[in-house]
Amino acid sequence: MSDETQVRIACTDEGEGAPLVLVHGFPLSRGAWASQVEAFRGTRRVIAPDLRGFGDSGSSVGAVSMERYADDLAELLDRLGTGPVVLAGHSMGGYVAFAFVRRYRERLRGLVLVSTRAGADAPQAAASRRATAEKVREVGVAPVIEAMLPKMVAPGTDDPELLAEVEALMTPSSVDGTIGALLGMAERPDSTPLLGEIDVPTLVITGGDDTVIPVADSEAMVAAIPGAELAIVPGAGHLVAYEKPEAFNQELRRWLVANEL
Ligand code: MLT
């Protein structure tokens, strides 16, 4: 089997109006957007899928390219019958958003890049992901979850309730899904050349204390994307939308309204 395998994609689909699509990062699931679903479903249609291999979606065996995730998303939007969408992608979800821009530009009204980066993996980082994929094959996903958990929140955050919630967002990740994403991220293309061609309103938003993807990566994207706006949420780590939902939602709402999206 390859990543051409069709799988069932689970999603949250609430509210009515202009569609806002929220794509989670690695190794998370759609519950990562719970506060955004709650905050925006009164005024728009909010769609949050579980990427293949995560949450309640089915898995396939082998590397899952960012293009494959983007195709899953396009097929889901076909099934849901949406018109063009505002697409928000967190971290790996941002890598998927770049693939979506490459393949489905006409289906986009706006782009929100959340704690993500445009560059590909350096060779050492790619090798390290492949080694992690091997480890997951041998012992399961627990070490990945354990390693990622403290990095999801701002350094020094030890709120046991928050950490338990974030762990629960990662727990349903399947072995195949986790391996597939690691191998897919390792081989993803550099999206930097795409940035200058992005011609939809774009918000780049990140946590001021993100230790996974430094704020500098967000600043570099804003400098390269025509007309892009930058929002930095103080005191938030990598999982900014979950850790500081009010500040995040305020920035997102302001940008949506300002751009008539
Ligand atoms: C994520 O949060 O999606 C990952 O940390 C992204 C990555 O590992 O590059």
Image: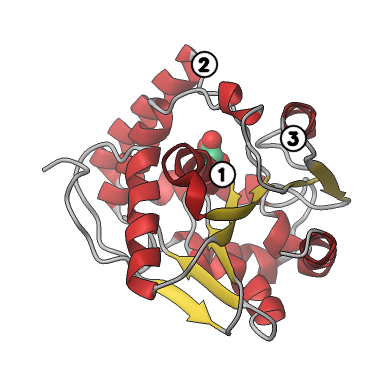
198 versus 120 height, above or below: below
Identity of the residue drawn at 52% across and 45% down = 97
**How would you rate the neighbour count of disc 1 (Cα within 10 Å): few for under 14, some for 14-19, many for 20 or more?**
many
Element at badge 1?
Answer: helix
Identity of the residue drawn at 21% across and 39% down = 62
* Marks 3,2: beta carbons within 8 A: no
Residue at which label 2 appears: 122
Residue at which label 3 appears: 218
Identity of the residue drawn at 79% across and 67% down = 253
State the quadrant of the N terminus: top left
Between circles 2 and 1, the one closer to the viewer is 1
* Marks 2,1: beta carbons within 8 A: no
Three-letter code for the amino acid on which mark 2 is drawn: Ala
> In the current view of this chain or complex, which residue is farthest to the right?
234
122 versus 12 height, above or below: above
Residue at which label 1 appears: 94
Three-letter code for the amino acid on which mark 1 is drawn: Gly
